[in-house]
Image: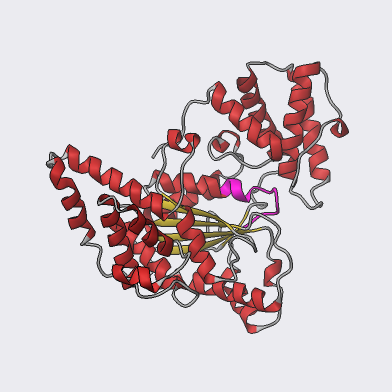
Amino acid sequence: MEMQVKLDQKLARRIIEIVGANGIPPEYGLQYFTVGLDTYLNVLEEEYISSFIKEGGASFKLVVGIYGGGKTHFLYLVRDLAWKYNFATAYVELSQNECPFSKLEEVYKGIVRNITPPLSYEELLSGYERGINNFIKHWIGWKTNILRQSGIDVKEINSAILEEVNTWKDLESISFARALKNAVKTYLDREEDDFDYIIQWLLGESYESRIHKKFGILEKIDKGTAFIMIRSLVKWIKYLGYSGLIILFDEAEQIPSLSRKDKDRLLSNLRELIDECSHQNFSNVMIFYAVPDKHFLEGRTQIYEALRQRLETVFEEINPSGVEIDLEKNNINPIEFLVEVGKRLKDIYEIAYSHNMPPNLANEAINKFAEKALEERYGDIGYKRLFVTKLITAFHYIRSRNSFPLWDEVSGTIK
């Protein structure tokens, strides 16, 4: 799927609003001000997404970037690449309250609640619904259209779909396979309550034997079955005709100090996930795990050492097999990086507001704000996010007052 479209005023305004408000990347449009990531993305596309993963491989990458340093930006670009090659994706924000990585069943839930088929530009901007329930409905709609175009009688379409569903065999979890088949059947038969009961189980929300046994679902989803369910999910996605699944874990907020027990579980789960990628029965899947730093690897026990060994290689153009992708090591001078981002944001801003700013004022803001943001790079927040929020506020100032603002005269909304 080709995601690049013409940058019109509506899209430009949307980009400026989202980036200027709090520095987070927009769901679409970040490619217009992306700088310094081409090498990483080109290698990932050539070595993995267009070939190795699509052909049955599996891989794990650790993405390291401070808060506000571009982790989410990078993951969104990877998601666009995945959609280009017909991969399903799951972008999962990790947090202690919503999706703690220390609990495997919550990791599974995070994936199935966020699984998304490849989306068009229009679908992405108009809003879309994630989750395995919508994923199933999307596939049924797509399959129905294919069958109609092939000339099959309308009355036979549902039967043809169910016939294909019966080819979904050899999933590791029999309960998972039965749940998927019955979900399709109940949806086609418009048995909404039964469909919702099955989806409830697939989402890991609850298991009620009285209800679920009649659909052949005989087990609950917990830490003991979570990996089995994830492997079954990936294989099912291949049955649907997708290239595989790209999972994007994003530690999107600062996680408070964990108890020793929870931290050990998190490390153990991460090690197991990495090891899964080397097993033959875990194929057509690529996992990115984004963190602000590698402090979580500081410890003296065997589990720390085992995980450090798995994460010590560095991903780069000459070593695509390396695991760690460090977003700060892009071989671009930080000032030059910020200035280039600023120039691109200026172009977007001018389209957004149909306003040409005086070049001397805009360029002065870009250069001076780049220097000032870099001075504060050792604070709690990434200098990249601080720069873009401050700069867009400065552009507003220039547009309204036709003069150059001082750093302290503009606010930078940082969380």
**Is 393 rendered above or below residue 374?**
above
In this view, the residue in front, 382 or 151, is: 151
* Camera sees residue 256: yes
In this view, the residue in front, 160 or 72, is: 160
Q: Position of residue 88 (x, y in %)?
A: 40, 52
In this view, the residue in front, 168 or 158, is: 158
Q: What residue lies at 18% left-to-right and 37% top-to-bottom?
A: 149
* Camera sees residue 280: no
Taking the image as shown, residue 366 lies to the left or right of residue 405, namely: left
In this view, the residue in front, 157 or 337, is: 157
Q: In which quadrant will I find the N terminus?
A: top left
Q: What residue lies at 37% left-to-right and 61% top-to-bottom?
A: 198
**Is 289 rendered above or below residue 157?**
below
Q: Is residue 71 magenta?
A: yes
Taking the image as shown, residue 30 lies to the left or right of residue 386, namely: left
Q: Position of residue 5 (x, y in %)?
A: 46, 29
Taking the image as shown, residue 368 lies to the left or right of residue 56, namely: right
Magenta highlight range:
64-74
Q: Position of residue 152 (x, y in %)?
A: 13, 42
Say how many tags the image has: 0
Residue 121, image quadrant: top left
Q: Position of residue 27 (x, y in %)?
A: 54, 40
Residue 265, image quadrant: bottom right
Q: What residue lies at 68% left-to-right and 69% top-to-bottom?
A: 296
